[in-house]
Amino acid sequence: MMKRFRSVLVQLFFLAERINVGGQAVLEGVMMRAPRSMAIAVRRPTGDISVKREEVPPLSERFPVVKLPIVRGAVALFSSLIMGLKALNFSANEAMAEEEEKEELSSWALGGTMAVALGFGVLLFFVFPLYLTKLLIPLIGTSNIIFNLVDGIIRVAVFLLYIVSISRMKDIQRVFQYHGAEHKTIFAFEAGEELTVANVARHSRLHPRCGTSFLLIVMLVSILVFSLIPKLWPFYLKAGSRVVLLPVIAGVSYELLKWSAKHDTSSFVRMIIKPGLALQRLTTREPDESQIEVAIRSMEEALDVNGGYRDDRLVV
């Protein structure tokens, strides 16, 4: 159960990518998402690959408001968390040895676990830096600009420290290898190549639409958004407003990520996305051939259910 919960926390760094085909690393496997489908492939202890696949019609077909800028990013964040948690639950059960008791989480348990993981993320990356910055006021003064800059620096530092810390866990290192396999497979698919282990292996494990890059953008955008909060507000109002503003920050960050992905041939954009790519050196590892096979299987299953639908429309 602890292994599953740690992986739920890592879910914060593997938000599904939403342009064309995206994905997420899970325990001993990969989840791939096409515009109208999802597939999860997991390597079982016996060596065979277990697959779960299903149709996932875009929410924008039922709710046109979801297509609006900013709104679509906020919806994508929470739908990614829900779908990612379900994928982690499936992978945790399939990755267990045959003699181990498998535990299927109910909808309530899944919701509760997601709430705890999301709450942990908000406290660690948004409330905790605010509290530390408040303690530093005697040293940094009362300037709103300096306060928000220090708060932002602490937030990014906590984020980087957290990534470095979890990267030392042995089971998480395996997840990072599958993360690399996911990126390589997506690159091969986007290049129009046949999805073979040899073709996939030669691609980069660093992808500009990675959830790690998205979260780094979130950290930077939050500095600007939080600077709009009146500095005279009491601590509890400032902390509460950060939770309320999280969907706005996610929406703006998503639009920036989407824009950078469409203009990644520009030298200016390449310079902007370099920090996110550099950060992925921590959250991805070079996969072995068996892990690449799992990622390819997940991609093929997702595309098969998707029925060849491969345009550039946003999927939420």
Image (cartoon, helix red, strand yellow):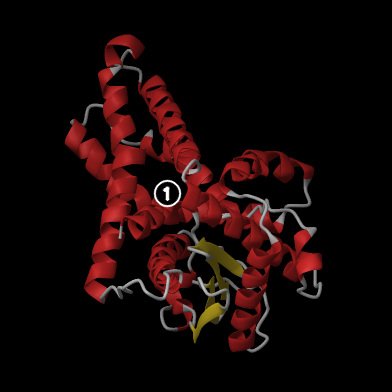
Compared to residue 1, the image places residue 153 above or below, namely above
Q: Where does the N terminus fall, quadrant-wise? A: bottom left
Q: In the picture provided, is 289 more to the left or to the right than 191?
A: left
Q: In the picture provided, is 43 more to the left or to the right than 238?
A: right
For the question of whether residue 38 can be seen, the reply is no
Q: Residue at x 57, y 51 (%)?
A: 256
232, 90: nearer the viewer:
90
**Outermost residue toward the top in this view:** 139
Residue type at mark 1 is Ile
Q: Residue at x 57, y 74 (%)?
A: 47
Label 1 sits on residue? 249
Q: Residue at x 64, y 75 (%)?
A: 299
106, 248: nearer the viewer:
106
Q: In the picture provided, is 140 more to the left or to the right than 177?
A: left
Residue 108 placement (x, y as % from top left): 22, 72
Q: Residue at x 42, y 49 (%)?
A: 249
At numbered mark 1, what does the secondary structure look like: helix, strand or loop?
Answer: helix
137, 64: nearer the viewer:
137
Q: How many marks?
A: 1
Residue 50 placement (x, y as % from top left): 52, 79
